[in-house]
Image (cartoon, helix red, strand yellow):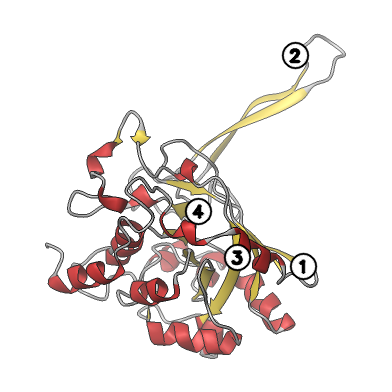
Amino acid sequence: MPLPPEFHDIAKRVNNWGRWGPDDELGTLNLITGATVRAAAATVRTGRRVPLALPLHQDGPQTGVIPGRINPLHTMVQINQELFGPGTVATSDDTVTMGLQAATHWDALTHASHSGRIYNGRPAGTITAHAGARFCGIEKVRSLVARGVLLDVARAKGLERLPGDHAVTPEDLAEAEEHAGLRVGPGDVVLVRTGQVRTLLAGDKHGYAYPSPGLSLRTPEWFHARDVAAVANDTLTFEIFPPEVEDLWLPVHALDLVEMGMLQGQNWNLEELSTACAEEGRHSFLLSATPEPFVGATGTPVAPVAVL
């Protein structure tokens, strides 16, 4: 099904192509500046550190539905091996094979394309089997430290988890923002909690994947208006799944990554952070979430940490 006029109308309103020049490969991460990082550092009061990543192991969130996106396969390649002769220091080494978007991760701007284009109007054909992404590969994001803001949509509604058919709207984001007692601003990284990861943590990876609450087609305009630098949430598909518009698959990916040039994060565990923010009565913090610099990759694992 071709992308409908509704999609193209929103795309025009949120498009950032050329905003930071024709050669730009960072998109909305340009909104993170020295000033915004200093302001982020000023949010640290107690030094409480909250990890946001899922463990990397073979029984991860992937169900096999997405071809090639496998959970981590961990193999030992040497165990207590005395490389320099008997009685010398012994070492152990391991290797991992995994889909780069298998667990807690960032989607690079090249993860999605539409109409033959990626962010900033470059041809989608610049992504090749041999070299990966020629432009906008995840390695171009050399650091990602910013003010993080938790928009706890589920808790703002008095719920542990949003229903599986709930499309998170701009009104939901505004309600969570009011609940947090702050205003999302330029250069912020927004973490949207739906509570869906509780299903995965309870052992139901299929229920985690489908049906799933997630961001609606209307949310990119809200993030664009606030000049948000990046968005992550606690679901497998980021946007509501199955889609709110029949046969319109992954439109939010296309609007965020292709049109806006805004990184997306998925499979983030926001449960401990939700508790910590509620206990401390604040929802902003210093967020460290620099992606692993796989050259030419369209996504990468990340181990984010919120510092309150």
Q: Is residue 188 left or right of residue 273?
A: left
Q: How many marks?
A: 4
Percent across and percent down for residue 145 are 61, 57
How many angstroms separate mark 1 from mark 2 (CA)? 41 Å
148 shown above or below 123: below
Sequence-first tag of 2 and 3 = 3
In the rendered image, the vertical position of residue 106 relative to residue 217, given as above or below: above
Mark 2 or 3: the one toward you: 3
Q: Depth check: 307 or 274 in front?
A: 307
The quadrant holding residue 147 is bottom right
Label 4 neighbour load within 10 Å: few <14, some 14-19, many 20+: many
Q: Which residue is mark 1?
A: 48
Q: Residues within 10 Å of mark 2 (few under 14, many from 20)?
A: few
- Choose the circle earlier in sequence order: 3 or 4: 3
Measure the alpha-carbon separation of dots 1 and 4: 22 Å
| Tag 3: amino acid | Thr
Residue 73, x across and y down, in percent: 53, 39
Classify mark 4: helix, strand or loop: strand
Please report contact status of discs 1 and 2: CB closer than 8 Å, yes or no: no
Q: Which mark is residue 83?
A: 2
Residue where numbered disc 4 is placed: 105
Residue at the spot of label 3: 36
Q: Nearer the viewer, residue 168 or 87?
A: 168
Contact check, label 1 and label 3, Cβ < 8 Å:
no
Type of amino acid at the residue the image marks with label 4 = His
Counting from the top left corner in percent of width and height, residue 166 is at 37, 81
Circle nearer the viewer, 3 or 4: 3
**Which badge, 1 or 3, comes first in the chain's sequence?**
3
Residue pictured at 74% horizontal, 69% vertical: 44
